[in-house]
Structures are given as structure tokens and as C-alpha cells.
Image: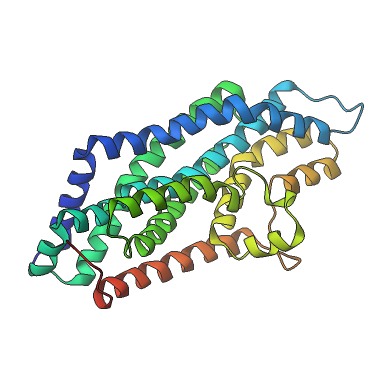
Amino acid sequence: MIGLGALLKRNIKLFFKDKGMFFTSLITPMILLLLYSTFLANVYRDAFASSIPTGVPIDDKLLDGAVGGQLLSSLLAVCCVTVSFCSNFLMVQDKVTGARGDLTMAPVRRSTLALGYYLASAAATLIICYAAAGASFLYLINVGWYLSGTDVAKILLDVFLLVMFGTALSSVINHFLCTQGQISAVGSIVSAGYGFICGAYIPISQFGETLQTVISFLPGTYATALLRNHAMRGVFAAMEESGIPSAALEGMRAAVDCEIRFFDHAVSESAMYAILVVTVLVLVAAFVLLTKFVRTRVR
């Protein structure tokens, strides 16, 4: 019987051996950080500045720190899921090359095969996303650092849970793919659309009421909110100490989705974590069952 450890070693090795897949996954977060800081920073900065009451002074470093926190949370919210899809394409490539057929003929349980793909993809994605988090922290140090050690630890936990979610979601979707064309199509759709529906590009608070209600059912929304809270808690506290009115700060927090409401009920941080964890468990269980009982075409 082929063990889970052997499958993990094989899948991780193949991912890093494919230089095109690895470097594409690695460079994507860096490109996003560059684009965000170049094109969105001024937009975010103007939005924060307009929220400050007239006549209330504010240090430019505080504004830059708020912008940096929003950029960091947006970047990580997107790349944790999009990179998960990239790293999980190995599962589909095995179908294209015929390796999947060889694996299913070997003495290995289908549930073990599924977990091998999932855990290997999650491990590769975590390496890349933690590297992206490190680059984002360096950016934040340069523009305005207001994070505590607890904030950093919570951000890293958020990244871990979001990678687990993104990998589980991509595993379920990729189970039904079996061609290179389908890989490209799904990758393009996820890259183009996920940032909007999770509130990373445009805060959900700026959408219509109906769309906000629909998006509140999506787990990724709460992952983005967790990252927002932990990346911006320190700078909001510093703003309060500098004399910014509480009403203005509450308006800022609501505008950047630090607070998410589900049918007019505020969702607590613990509830957001519970939603993510339960969603990951359900998706992983669904993927294992699909692999075990639902056959897909392999070459």
C-alpha cells in the first residue's frame, strides 16, 4: 500500500520541479503587491483622508499605514486562493499525462490519493503565501508599521486558514477538470473574479444591498474581513490616540469591511473563524468523497 507520505513527497517534488508553474505562482503575489501599491495606494489614501473631519489634523504616516494595511489584507486575501488553484493544477495535469491512471491502478486508497493532492497543494501554497506575507510586511515597515506581535500572529493564522480554504475549494473544482484548456479557463476566471467577490479589490460596503446580502453567504468574505481587522487594528488604534473622532474611525472600519453584517446582524471574529474552519472541513470531506466515488475521465 502506497502511503500518504510517499504521495506528498511525489506531489510536492513535481510542483517545485515544474519551474513554469512554481515561478508563476511565486511571482504573482509580488506583481499584485507592485500593482496595488502603484495604482490603488492613492485611491485608498484619498478615501481615508476624505473620512477625516475638516479641521482635524492627521499625520501622513498614519494615512500611509492605513493604506498599507488595506493593501496587505487585499493582497493576501486574493493570492491565498489564486495561488491555491495554480498549485492544485498538478491534479489535473496527472489526468492529462496519464499519471492519474497509473496511480489509481497502484495499491493506494482513493481517499489517500485525494489527501495526498490536497496536503501537497496546501504545503506548496503556504510556502508561497508566507513569502508574500513577508514581502508585504517589509512594504508595511517602509510605509508605516503599526502591527503588534499578536496582529502578525493572527495574520499568519488567517493566511493558513485561507490557504486551507482555497486549496479545498480548488480541489473540489479541479476534480471535474481533465484538459489543459479547462485549467486555463478556470485559472483565468478565478484570477479575474475572486478579488471582487471577496471584497479585496472593492470593499463590499460599496456594493448594493442585494449584492452585499449575496456575498455575505461566501466564506471568502469573512477571510478578507479577518485580514482587514488584524492588518488595520493597530493603525486605527493609533488614529484614535492622535485625536481622530470615534465616529470617523467607525466609518472607516465599516468602509473597508472590518465589520461584516449578515442580515443586519454583526458577525463576530470568532464566528468568522468558525465559518472558515467548518467550510474547510466540509470541502475537504466533499473532495475525498468525490475522489472515492465519482470517476472522472483520465487519459
Residue 184 place in picture, x, y as percent: 36, 48
Residue 72 sits above or below residue 167 on the image: above
Residue 196 place in picture, x, y as percent: 59, 48
Q: Going 59% across and 45% down the picture, which residue do you hit?
A: 200
Residue 120 sits above or below residue 129 on the image: below
Residue 19 sits above or below residue 211 on the image: above
Residue 108 place in picture, x, y as percent: 12, 69
Q: Image quadrant of residue 142?
A: top right
Residue in front for this viewpoint, 190 or 286? 190
Locate the C terminus and report the quarter of the image it occupies: bottom left
Question: Looking at the image, what colour scheme do you see?
Answer: rainbow
Q: Going 55% across and 25% down the picture, which residue do you hit?
A: 141
Residue 1 place in picture, x, y as percent: 7, 69
Q: Image quadrant of residue 223?
A: bottom right
* Marker count (numbered): 0
Residue 299 sits above or below residue 29 on the image: below
Q: Going 85% across and 44% down the picture, which residue do you hit?
A: 247
Q: Going 51% across and 26% down the picture, which residue do you hit?
A: 34
Outermost residue on the right side: it is: 55
Q: Image quadrant of residue 212?
A: bottom right
Q: Is residue 131 visible?
A: yes
Q: Is residue 159 visible?
A: no
